[in-house]
Image (spheres, grey):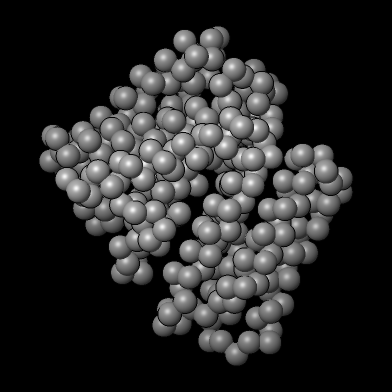
């Protein structure tokens, strides 16, 4: 019970910061999400700090990750010219060069891990910022996306605690059940209908399709994070959020979902 109370308070404060920063405006959101991105990137690389055979240069990964994030946000805000996007490609290859001066046994794995950290953490946070910059709805679509992700997570957890019996993916996440997954999905679809019908009127089709994208995205994002932690034999990626763990623990579903939701938003914006 104590853990549930702590988890609820932390979740409420966290949600207030995320949604509040988005509603406040793109500049406040960018500043807030920049902090989340930096903490998440540090967390990701720190997971492998004492790994037996993976030896990565955390500082290099973080430096280049922050630089890429800054370039992309600057371009989206029209502070930097679109030409600057061309700088991103040589930056990725710069990661490869640093392995030439190191004498590690697995340079290919080290490079792959550095690049994956940027793709997994930096890109989704940037896309969340860019979504808000493109917003034309009464309630920003990126807000609706987060609300649906959290609805799915919350009701999957509550339904699983109440009636969950059949394991969903016991090898990776033994606490998740099919009953919880279905419960979370049903409430997410219902909330998506409410958003499209009563909040962002006229967007019912968009939000119903969004729910069908967000539900599996949130599930797979959660399972992917569980896979990372189980393979590294750790419980949480950090301890910055009481009751939840680290930044990656709290954003696990969102990091996987955001690219798919962003793609659907672009399809709806340009073609539908």
Side (left or right) of 95 relative to 23: right
Task: Name the residue nearer the viewer: 97 or 37.
Answer: 37
Looking at the image, residue 60 lies above or below residue 66: below
Using the rendered image of the protein, determine whether residue 225 is visible from the camera's viewpoint: no
Tell me residue 50's x, y (percent).
Answer: 43, 80
Q: Residue 202: x percent and y percent? A: 55, 9
Residue 36 visible? The answer is yes
Asked where in the image residue 86 lies, by quadrant, the reply is: bottom right
Q: Quadrant of residue 171 in the image?
A: bottom left
With 179 as the anchor, is 89 left or right in this view?
A: right
Residue at (34%, 54%) from the top-left corner?
242
Task: Report x, y in % for residue 210.
Answer: 49, 26
Question: Where, quadrant-wise, is the N terminus in this rendering?
Answer: top left
Residue drawn at x 36%, y 26% as measured from the top left: 188
Q: Which residue is drawn at 82% across and 39% down?
A: 78
Residue 247 picture location, percent across and down: 45, 54
Q: Look at the image and tell me in which quarter the C terminus lies.
A: top right
For residue 250, above or below residue 136: below
Q: In this view, does 194 lie to the left or right of 134?
A: left
Please tell me which residue is depicted at 68% across the width and 53% down the height of the picture. 69
């Amino acid at each position: 019970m104590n853990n549930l109370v702590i988890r609820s308070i932390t979740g409420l404060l966290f949600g207030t910061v995320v949604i509040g920063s988005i509603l406040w405006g793109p500049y406040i959101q960018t500043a807030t999400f920049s902090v989340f991105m930096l903490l998440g990137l540090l967390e990701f690389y720190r997971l492998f700090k004492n790994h037996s055979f993976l030896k990565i240069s955390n500082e290099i990964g973080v430096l280049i990750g922050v630089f890429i994030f800054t370039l992309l946000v600057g371009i989206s805000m029209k502070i930097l010219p679109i030409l600057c996007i061309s700088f991103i490609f040589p930056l990725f290859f710069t990661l490869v060069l640093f392995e030439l001066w190191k004498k590690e046994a697995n340079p290919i794995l080290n490079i792959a891990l550095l690049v994956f950290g940027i793709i997994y953490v930096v890109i989704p946070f940037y896309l969340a910022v860019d979504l808000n910059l493109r917003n034309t709805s009464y309630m920003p679509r990126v807000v609706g996306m987060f609300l649906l992700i959290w609805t799915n997570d919350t009701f999957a957890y509550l339904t699983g605690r109440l009636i969950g019996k059949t394991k969903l993916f016991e090898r990776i996440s033994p606490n998740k059940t099919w009953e919880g997954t279905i419960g979370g999905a049903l409430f997410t679809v219902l909330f998506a209908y409410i958003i499209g019908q009563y909040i962002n009127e006229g967007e019912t089709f968009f939000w119903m399709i969004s729910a069908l994208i967000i539900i599996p995205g949130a599930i797979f994002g959660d399972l992917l994070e569980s896979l990372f932690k189980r393979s590294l034999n750790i419980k949480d990626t950090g301890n910055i959020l009481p009751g939840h763990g680290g930044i990656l623990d709290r954003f696990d579903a969102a990091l996987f979902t955001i690219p798919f939701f962003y793609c659907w938003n672009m399809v709806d914006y340009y073609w539908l």
